[in-house]
Image (cartoon, rainbow, N blue to C red):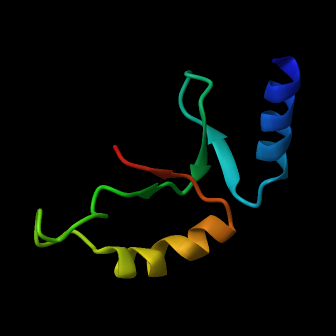
């Protein structure tokens, strides 16, 4: 398991995104974080973005390995 953890840390260190520690938790998050609460089916709520619009937003962020989170 140590090898797997080492590879994860190596990947984080080599990423293009900038990571910061979140408070005293030790959790590392990318700066900035892209919230994804508004992604989904607009039939649910009118302000929700459909897949086509989400791709335009998400694809460049994936390219720089930005963390995306649904809080």
* Quadrant, the N terminus: top right
| Number of numbered callouts drawn | 0
Q: Is residue 67 above or below residue 22?
A: below
Q: Quadrant of residue 21?
A: top right
Residue nearest the viewer, comparing 33 with 23: 33
Q: What residue is at 53 percent from the left and 28 percent from the top? A: 23
Q: What residue is at 64 percent from the left and 42 percent from the top? A: 20
Q: Is residue 39 left or right of residue 41?
A: right
In the image, residue 43 lies at what x, y percent? 11, 69
Q: Is residue 66 left or right of residue 17?
A: left
* Quadrant, the C terminus: top left
In the image, residue 48 lies at what x, y percent? 21, 68
In the image, residue 58 lies at what x, y percent? 50, 70
Q: Quadrant of residue 65?
A: bottom right
In the image, residue 44 lies at what x, y percent? 12, 62
Q: What residue is at 59 percent from the left and 30 percent from the top? A: 27
Q: Is residue 18 left or right of residue 30?
A: right
Q: What residue is at 68 percent from the left and 66 percent from the top? A: 64
Q: Is residue 27 above or below residue 55?
A: above
């Amino acid at each position: 398991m140590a090898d797997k953890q080492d590879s994860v840390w190596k990947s984080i260190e080599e990423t293009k995104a900038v990571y910061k520690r979140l408070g005293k938790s030790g959790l590392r998050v990318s700066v900035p974080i892209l919230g994804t609460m508004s992604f989904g089916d607009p039939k649910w709520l009118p302000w929700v973005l459909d897949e086509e619009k989400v791709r335009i937003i998400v694809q460049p962020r994936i390219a720089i390995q930005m963390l995306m989170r649904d809080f």
